[in-house]
Image (cartoon, coloured by chain):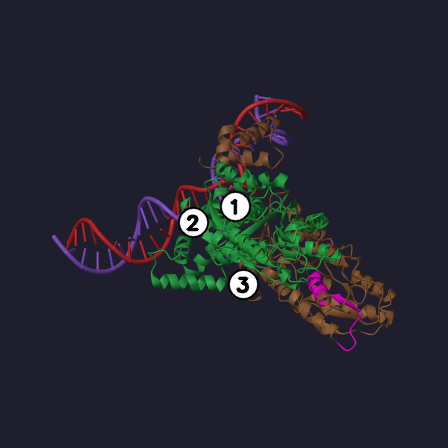
Chain colours: A green, B brown, C red, D purple
DNA sequence: TCCGACGTTCAAACCGGTTTAGTCGGCCTC
DNA sequence: GAGGCCGACTAAACCGGTTTGAACGTCGGA
């Protein structure tokens, strides 16, 4: 395996200096067309591509974005958001040869990971997802001088640029639809309220019920997990006056809820309507197919990558607002049972 | 935001040369204890950490592994394997400050991504997953001189080091169990046969049936997707003589199969037994809970990272064999219906 | 004929580390 | 007291790029 060619090899082969090779490659003015062509041919002959390491060192760029996920691997695995989001990011930064550093860690070690990323200049910037209440990361980013973009609502990120996709309308639509179908006892199985989007979904549920003049049904924690969703559902369905509809914080909890209903002999949607969130691949193929809400995670990733580009280049950028999530009605909702 | 400190700042503050700082930091002999302490204090005072870029350039290391996934984002999203696998890799390489570059791409662009990774020396090595029949990647890795480890069986990787976790025993166990329960018409809904592990599962199914002296039931393609699983199940259950048990290539297809069975009024497990593969988080909470097979994806990631370390350091490494996947019986299997 | 401007190219410095090949002073030995 | 050795430290080269400042040849204009 021959040593990888360097810019010096190319320079020698083209009979020019290293500087000229660099200029030719980067389309700088002041290089004769004929010379540039010769350099490019030499580079192609040798199969030379500039080393990202060396280039980064000179330019002061890492050529990578960071994404730190401080969740249980199991939870991430069930979440259709991340792969699509990552694919979107990749579509933007991959074209120019940049990459995405994914770090899966625990909440305790999260801060250390960001500090390392910043101190070692391993990435040019980071994407912040899963924002929590009193999230320490926005101030930390400022302290570390690490460019960052918040994937979520603008008010979550302090003065950081946010790329937001509103999930309230989908929730409101779902609940309005349930109300139209005659439901009056609509429960909510919420995600961890520590997570801002989970909290936001709960708030959307409350506000929509108020706006419709409906009473707030019971709320139980579901933790965005199948375990939590199952437990909460079991509890709700054994209440003296069980709800006729349950809106879950995500699909995972909702799918588990469907199973529990079935186990308890509660027919969906005849006796119970169920709504999830995320439009996971399986929702269309549950029985009955699960009504959910679809967000364009891939587009979100693309927008976030572009916003981070701008933040890195200019120091700041305007918030970006994407089209809101869409309610996707399916057979898991139906008319409220006659009371 | 002050300029980030460099090794020169630390050297000046400690009153030594840059070389001494480097030696002190890397625990090289030939530095007085007192001096080393002074350097470390100075580094701590300034909050200095060596730049990974510069360090990498000198050492000829990138400080990152690459993972290229050439699948649909939607499919990856539903697969519990990757997050756990990535978490395992991270656990090994994160300790020393290295990272994992994840590239989500399409099969067409896959080769280009590897070429770029190699040419630009963005990563020190790559982990190859989802091996296909006649996979072009093992020879490509050799051609590119890119250290690599195959996540799968040794015979899949040519002369590359493989880290394998056998899924055959779990399959064999599942089928044996079904046979014990009296099943004689056991169908298989296979994954894309292009994928070696999908093919391997199908082969395991065949071989086990032979070993037990049972006839091969029908085999239908399920594509590892809920769509495919649903379609195949519908077809199987409407046969003149439908199978009494179906073994799926993965959980996603199996979950969709469960729903179809229900939709068609086929009771599981009374009339039909169902087995999946992967032990996705939802399987425990489907109705009925889905029998599946569990593999230690996290441990697989750890082992793969360690093996890649060895390959990078020594040029080659011995194959690693992990404990096989385990069959996880659950309520979705039961005695064969009386014929 | 001489000068300045211009287009082209290159030598050298730089990015921030690591590493090699010394230098320096002190101690031991003969 | 000279020579040799050793431990502690440093100057300088190196990794592979980019960028600055200057040099060079050519041409047009005075």
Is label 3 in contact with label 1 (beta carbons under 8 Å)? no
Q: Secondary structure at mark 1?
A: helix
- Tell me if mark 3 has few (under 14), some (14-19) or many (20+) residues whose alpha carbon lies within 10 angstroms of its own: few
Q: Which mark is residue B53?
A: 1
Which quadrant, please, contains the N terminus of chain B? top left
Residue identifier under label 2: A310
Is residue B55 part of the magenta span, yes or no? no
Which quadrant, please, contains the C terminus of chain B? bottom right
Is residue B258 part of the magenta span, yes or no? yes
Q: CA distance from mark 2 to mark 3?
A: 27 Å
* Labels 3 and 1 positioned on one and the same chain: yes
Residue identifier under label 3: B112
- Tell me if mark 2 has few (under 14), some (14-19) or many (20+) residues whose alpha carbon lies within 10 angstroms of its own: some
Q: Which chain contains the residue that carries disc 1?
A: B
Near-viewer residue (A211 or C17): A211
At a point 84% along the width and 63% down the height, the residue shown is: B177
Q: CA distance from mark 3 to mark 1?
A: 24 Å
Residue B231 position in % (x across, y down) = 67, 71
Q: Secondary structure at mark 3?
A: helix
Magenta-tinted stretch: B239-260
Near-viewer residue (B6 or A139): A139
| Left or right, residue A222 beside residue A88 | right
* Labels 2 and 3 positioned on one and the same chain: no
Residue A142 position in % (x across, y down) = 48, 38
Q: Which residue appears farthest toward the bottom when viewing the image?
A: B240
Q: Which mark is residue B309?
A: none
When the figure is inspected, residue B192 is found, relative to residue A314, above or below; the finding is below
Residue B246 position in % (x across, y down) = 77, 67
When the figure is inspected, residue A127 is found, relative to residue B250, above or below; the finding is above
């Amino acid at each position: 395996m021959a040593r990888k060619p360097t810019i010096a090899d190319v320079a020698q082969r083209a009979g020019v200096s290293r500087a000229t090779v660099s200029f030719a490659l980067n389309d700088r003015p002041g290089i004769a067309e004929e010379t540039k062509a010769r350099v490019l041919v030499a580079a192609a002959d040798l199969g030379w591509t500039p080393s990202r390491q060396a280039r980064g060192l000179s330019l002061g760029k890492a050529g990578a974005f960071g994404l730190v996920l401080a969740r249980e691997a199991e939870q991430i695995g069930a979440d259709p958001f991340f792969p699509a989001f990552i694919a979107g990011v990749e579509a933007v930064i991959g074209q120019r040869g940049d990459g995405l550093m994914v770090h899966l860690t625990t909440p305790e070690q999260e801060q250390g990971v960001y500090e390392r990323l910043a101190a070692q200049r391993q990435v040019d910037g980071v994407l912040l997802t899963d924002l929590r209440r009193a999230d320490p990361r926005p101030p930390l980013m400022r302290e570390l001088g690490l460019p960052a973009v918040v994937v979520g609502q603008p008010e979550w990120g302090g003065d950081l640029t946010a790329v937001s996709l509103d999930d309230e309308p989908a929730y409101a639509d779902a609940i309005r639809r349930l109300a139209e179908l005659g439901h009056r006892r609509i429960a909510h199985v919420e995600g961890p309220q520590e997570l801002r989007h989970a909290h936001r979904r709960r708030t959307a549920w409350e506000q929509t019920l108020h706006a419709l003049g409906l009473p707030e049904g019971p709320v139980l924690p579901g933790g965005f997990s199948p375990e939590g969703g199952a437990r909460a559902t079991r509890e709700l369905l054994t209440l003296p006056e069980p709800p006729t509809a349950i809106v879950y914080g995500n699909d995972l909890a909702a799918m588990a809820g469907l199973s529990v209903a079935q186990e308890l002999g509660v027919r969906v949607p005849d006796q119970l309507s169920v709504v999830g969130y995320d439009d996971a691949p399986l929702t269309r193929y549950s029985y009955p197919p699960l009504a959910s809400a679809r967000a364009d995670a891939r587009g979100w990733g693309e927008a976030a990558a572009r916003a981070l580009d701008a933040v890195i280049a200019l120091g700041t950028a305007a918030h970006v607002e994407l089209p809101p999530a869409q309610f996707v009605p399916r057979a898991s909702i139906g008319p409220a049972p006659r009371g």
